[in-house]
Amino acid sequence: MTTYGLLVFEDAEELDFVGPWEVFTVSARLREAGDTAVLVSEHPGPVRCNKGLRVLPDHTFDDHPPLDVLHVPGGRGAREAQLHNPVVTDWIGKTAERAAWVHGVCTGTFLLHAAGPARGRRVATHWSQEDTLETLGDVTVVRDVRYVVDGNLVTSQGVSAGIDSALWLVGRLHGREHARAVRRYIQYDPAPPYLADEPV
């Protein structure tokens, strides 16, 4: 049984956790093995995310089940307010020590750096924040890659890269064929209508 815990907070980027949530919950449905995904927040009650989506967490820091996978999204809240919230960073640090895997998306890597799990590690983050993260020190920012795996830490660039890394993670946990089945179920096969390398 695998339990995924996805941290949510004010001004979290919606798709940074909703995309992986889709991957984790479809994985749980296909496995029929008692896997579960839960939203965890510092406080009970609705959380308003970066674009205005409101979500209701399942648990607070004090009452969540043991987590096999800790997921940390990015967004304005990650790189501004929560970065300086010791309750959140302490919880991330302690929970990461007990989790089998830690998964960060976009500027969630800033929170993982502040909390400790990303220090001394190779990481990815949103392209616009790579220089800023690097100036914090004690971290190697890997550029121009969708996601980076360093030990039990998986970090990725934003939004769709978070889905990519979540698919990699369920494949690592439950096998590549299972990850392919999840990808097929959610019909995840990106085909952007406007490609950067199209001739003008």
Image (cartoon, grey):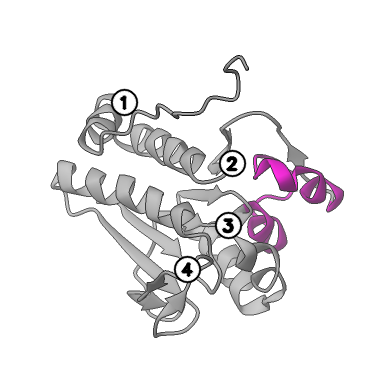
Tell me the number on the disc at residue 74.
3
Outermost residue toward the left in this view: 32
User: In front: mark 3 or mark 1?
Assistant: 3
Residue type, label 3 = Gly
Q: Are marks 3 and 4 in contact (CB under 8 Å)?
A: no
Sequence order check, earlier mark of 2 and 3: 3
Q: Is residue 34 above or below residue 130?
A: below
Where is residue 192, by image quadrant? top left
Left/right of residue 42 with respect to residue 168 in the rendered view: right
Left/right of residue 74 with respect to residue 182 in the rendered view: right
Q: Look at the image and tell me whether residue 70 can be seen.
A: no
Q: Which type of secondary structure does the marked residue at label 2 adopt?
A: loop
- Identity of the residue drawn at 39% across and 29% down: 190
Q: Are marks 4 and 2 in contact (CB under 8 Å)?
A: no
Residue type, label 1 = Arg
Mark-to-mark CA distance, 3 and 4: 9 Å
**Which residue is the site of mark 4?**
8
Q: Camera-side residue: 118 or 94?
A: 118
Mark-to-mark CA distance, 3 and 1: 27 Å
Q: Is residue 36 above or below residue 65?
A: above
Where is residue 108, by image quadrant? bottom right
